[in-house]
Amino acid sequence: MGELSSHFKSRNPSAIRLAQIEYAKRTDNVGVVNTAIGNVSLPMHPAMQKRMFNLNSENSPFRGGVVKYTATIGLEETNKAFLNIISSSGFDTQKLFSQITDGGSQSMELVIIGCCGRPGTSEKPLLLIDAAYTNYKAMASRLGRTTVSIVRNLDEQGKFSLPDIEKIESVIQEFKPGALVVIPYDNPTGQFYDLEIFKKLAELCVKHNMWLISDEAYRELHYVKHDTVSVWGITNKEVPGIEGRRISIETTSKVWNACGLRIGALITDNIEFHQKAIAENTASLCSNSIGQYIAGALAHVPHNELNEWYEKQRAYYFSMMKQMTQEFKNLMPDIIISNPEASIYSVIDVRKMVDDDFDSLDFVKYCATKGKVEMDGEFVTLLVSPMGGFYSIKSGEPNPGKTQMRIAYVASPAEMAKVPMLFKELFNQYLNLNND
């Protein structure tokens, strides 16, 4: 028997995938509404579908059945597609450099390697805003990098708020991070970072010589009256010195409903970072060439049509979010649920309804492995993500995620309509089981 590395020995499934893994072990044929993973179930943009269903067409590079590598930077057309998308939101792309990656996930790895140092050297950790997308911590651990964080608070009205800028700056001064990650249309919280907040964070990056990494997987999915925000809307005019330290992570997964395509992009205005990121990525050869070709269709879609697509996506999600938020409050008056401001997630907090022993991880495991509710003549359970893993809390300090769970609006509207009642019934089952 070979011996596992210490890293492998310490690994557990991410909070996002845990429920699905546990549910897969069941043998009782209980149905499921899976809101634990942001696995969008809507069809891709029509231009992308057209290419996918016509891979054998006269103009397809795959007509002869040959699937070659592309250059590591990716197809020129696919890079133009991502720049066209950014431009459609009103931002100047003339001085931006793009490379294609295996979804946003590989872009995350590259920015961590490129912006942060290993412990014991000139360490520059990655600064996250908790609750933070769990994969940033997982990727940093895989790469031998560390993370530090500042913590947002969820008030009883469902509003997340950042600490004062002075407190954020004190964390920067103490740990000297190499980069700050901002998710303007936030996963997991659904918080929207308006331009003023974004500019203040950018000013800190300039002042303390940090990279500003903007994860823009959900750009244009906002439900408040505000212009679209992006790192590409913050120039030297707004924040002197910000240019040359800006990076965005792009993907076809969310806005374009192509999670399984695994095509993303790493975009920067820093030519040296761009060149070194490509050099680093040559070890991975290239991203999926068929996926690149499908995504490349967006290079030719006019801006007015792209903006019509954004409007359609926003209307779809906001209607569902608004209805479900209200239904949760009707069924469980003491529940705290985050306001639907952006992205495709809500955070539920049951802290007013439980004692100190409650742990959302245990509740999620119960739902995945044992819980079931009879609905419409069949037994069903619900999968959600426990939020404990979305926080980087020092040992001995309370973790807000112990009473919080994330719900992704990825099932059909009919399935999502079941979620509030499913959650209530499973929650009551769990509490009664533990009180017996």
Image (spheres, grey):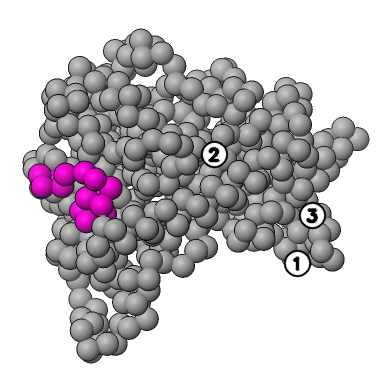
| Mark 1, secondary structure of its residue | loop
Q: Is residue 89 magenta?
A: yes
User: Could you say where residue 318 lies in the image, as x and y percent from the top left?
Assistant: 54, 47
Q: How far apart are marks 1 and 2 (CA)?
A: 33 Å
Which residue does the image show at 41% across and 63% down from the upper left? Answer: 258
Q: How crowded is mark 2: few (under 14 residues within 10 Å), some or many (20 or more)?
A: many
| Mark 2, secondary structure of its residue | loop
Query: Which numbered dot is residue 29?
Result: 1
Badge 3 or badge 2: first in the primary sequence: 2
| Mark 3, secondary structure of its residue | loop
Which residue lies under the disc numbered 2? Answer: 340
Q: Give the range drawn in magenta.
A: 83-96
- Residue 430 vs 149, above or below: the answer is below
Q: What residue type is labelled 1?
A: Asn
Query: Which numbered dot is residue 413?
Result: none
Which residue lies under the disc numbered 3? Answer: 372
Which residue does the image show at 67% across and 60% down from the upper left? Answer: 414
Which residue does the image show at 82% across and 36% down from the upper left? Answer: 431
Badge 1 or badge 3: first in the primary sequence: 1
